Image (cartoon, rainbow, N blue to C red):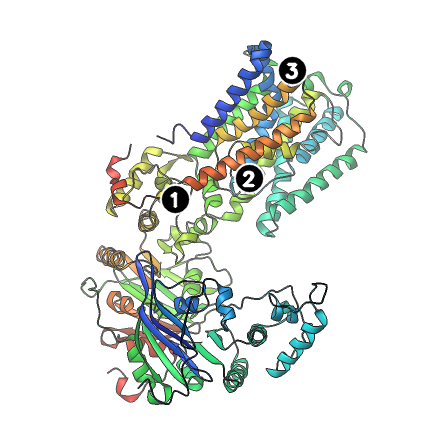
Amino acid sequence: MTTLSAPSSPVVSMDMITKTFPGVKALDEVKLDLFPGQVTALVGENGAGKSTTVKILTGIYHPDGGTVRIDGDPAVFASPNDAADAGITAIHQETVLFDELSVAENIYIGHAPRTRFGLIDTAKIHRAATDLLDEIGAPFSSHTQLRDLGIANKHLVAIARALSVDARVVIMDEPTAALSHKEIEELYDLVETLKSQGKAILFISHKFDEIFRIADRYTVFRDGAFVGDGLISDIDEDALVKMMVGRAVDHIFPDRDPVVGEDVLQVVGYDHPTEFADIGFSLKRGEILGFYGLVGAGRSEFMQALFGITKPSKGVTKMNGEIRTIRSPADAVKNGIVYVPEDRGKQGAIIGLPIFQNITLPSLRRTSNHGFLRLAEEFKLARDYAERLDLRAASLDQDVGNLSGGNQQKVVIAKWLATRPQVIILDEPTKGIDIGSKAAVHEFMAELAVQGLSVIMVSSEIPEVIGMSDRVIVMRDGRIAAELAGDELSPETLVRHAAGITMSAESVPA
Amino acid sequence: MSRFIPVRETILAAAILVLMFLIASRFPGFVAPSNLANVFNDTSPLIILALGQMVVILTRCIDLSVAANLALTGMAVAMINVAMPGLPIPVIIAIAILTGSFMGAINGILVWKLAIPPIVVTLGTMTIFRGIIFLISDGKWVNSHEMSPAFTGFPRAELLGLPVLSWIAVATVLIFAVMMSRTPLGRSIFAVGGNPHAAVYTGINVGKTQFLAFVISGALAGLTGYLWVARYAVAYVDIAGGFELEVVAACVIGGISIAGGIGSVGGAVLGAIFLGVVKNALPVVNISPFWQLAISGSAILIAVAFNARAGRTKGRIILKSAEKPVGATP
């Protein structure tokens, strides 16, 4: 299948590429071929290894094994400059350009033509930049300040820059994520232009309509491994979704009985001017409710609003049937809702405070007497929860910064459990941790639910969502796309609702 | 155990002792108890202000307006004293603290509600406060003969062998030691500086905590304003000019991380005492006071380099064998 009508040999070919990070195998002997004049879509779930692949191709990461070949010759990219010299350039989701410089300066920064005095030849870069901008049909002049351009136009500058270094391979990492419909159409035209110039394009996208619209070939990764590749014309959406998600569940999720408790939390009509609209659901005692969606679907944004962080949002929150006003995280904690955020490094443990003080921080009202803290009480509270979570530390007095990542996470979770919450929101609870720790987190989550705590789990990992949740809410573009439970929960239905693919007859659940 | 014998503070205390030993080897009179009491008394305003500054720096802010706040409050209470010589001293002190707190609150509100960088806010209010002193005083001095004897006498009155000024510094240190280690506010101050993002999720209002830090710093600046003016028995526009930098220096030397979240009451006090000893020793050993600036500057650089090093060498426990279960907690 892979040898079909490849017009020529690949420009870039990754072969048996492996990349390991401490505790995680990000890429396991993957292969990826990019052909001149063709768009190859790299398809995979979050964590499939797409970003790592891009970083290896652009010289940011160095593979631990395997070969990257340029025109058939092995190449080693010691630095991003080497990759650029080999003609590989990437256009990122957040374009890396300089706001305070002009468009021409952005296009030529790092390789600007010089005058004979060694100064930058301004006249020449503007002339050359104007030619490039005309070529791609950019509606602005080379003198425009970059900061005055919108994201779509910044992409054009990045593409012009790629052309200026005579790039042969252009990597587009979710280029349409922040574009309007019209801008996306213009980007497609540009991709066609680049194709006609013989550039090889690597296109990374979660949107299936996009992939089928502009890609010629596809390559699928799953969990850091190569699954398959071929021509887009030989495959349909169903088959591609199956390749992307269809895996043997390689990890046993803890067994729980279905919950039949009463509603603890009810959320009605949550709206935000720009981030989400019309969010409403209920959560039973002891239930695990999964929130699935693509990155940027508004899940974390909504959770932050529910927790009282995002201010300009409206909506009604009821705890045990009573309306509660939550205007700040302090209100949320007081009402029994806690939030374990995604970026634990930034939003989790407080480095510099000892372990016990980290654990008691949200519970200081309980450990103090007439406004003075009682250290003995604090130690007792901290020790109770540290023991429950099997925290491994020399002493509760030591700086939390000296703990390993997994133990730091235990401190953060202990901190929240010590507030005796009724609802715990876990945002990507297992992102970036190794398989063993994942199982421990899942085990623990199930235990919490059995003990009567209600869990909201925001996750982008399909097996986790299906394996752990009693019910799943799928969000898309800031709205609830579906609420699924029981037999409706399958990788295919989740991906379909999240990506907005219409149901084909045979895969509509009964 | 490291909690009870903090390394940084121990080293700084040792440095102060070595310094005093060196001075004493040539001028034994310097370490006579009466002279040491004088040095402490002379350093008391710096200690008080350094504690306020410490709180602000811990929350990732900085207060450059302390000296101007001090000067404005000092001028205000001096003029009140001239106008109403009968006003009792406790009332004067209350006015000074309230005036200082109010100015600190202005800083705090600007940082909290308008999210202006603290260095910009306090650089601005520093200039404004100095300008206001000129406006209310017409640039004139308030001299000792205009002040009431009770007004000027209070900080110098002796109690158990030490002037009241010294006792106020001691009391402030004790209050702050308790506040920082035993109250939710003290804990919040460390949390906000250590990891503001995490503090938000914990239910701590970061902006409000920073606001309170500025109010505390302002209150102490106000208190010191009265003590300063009364002690030197003079008030004019430029008193304590540039003193804010000495206050920040005391904190930095004392190991308060300028990035926030790390520091201690003991460190701030020792930092202030170090500068006080240097300042008082130089005339004794007959070195030009201009050297004092160079010495303070070097001390700051050494302290910062030392702290940066200490931060780097901190290792992580990765090996399982290096870990012990929690049961071993003291």
Closest to the observer, B301 or A399: B301
Secondary element at image label 3:
helix
Q: Which residue is mark 1?
A: A401
Q: Residue at x 75, y 32 (%)?
A: B237
Which residue is labeled 2 in the image?
B56
Chain at numbered mark 1:
A
Q: Does A183 appear above or below B23?
A: below
Q: Quadrant of residue A473?
A: bottom left
Residue with the mark numbered 3: B284
Position of residue B246 in the picture relative to residue A210 (left or right): right
Pointers 3 and 2 within a single chain: yes
The image position of residue A144, as x and y in percent, is: 67, 72
For the question of whether residue A273 can be seen, the reply is no
Q: Nearer the viewer, residue A356 or A237?
A: A237
| Residue type, mark 1 in image | Gly
Residue B218, label in figure: none
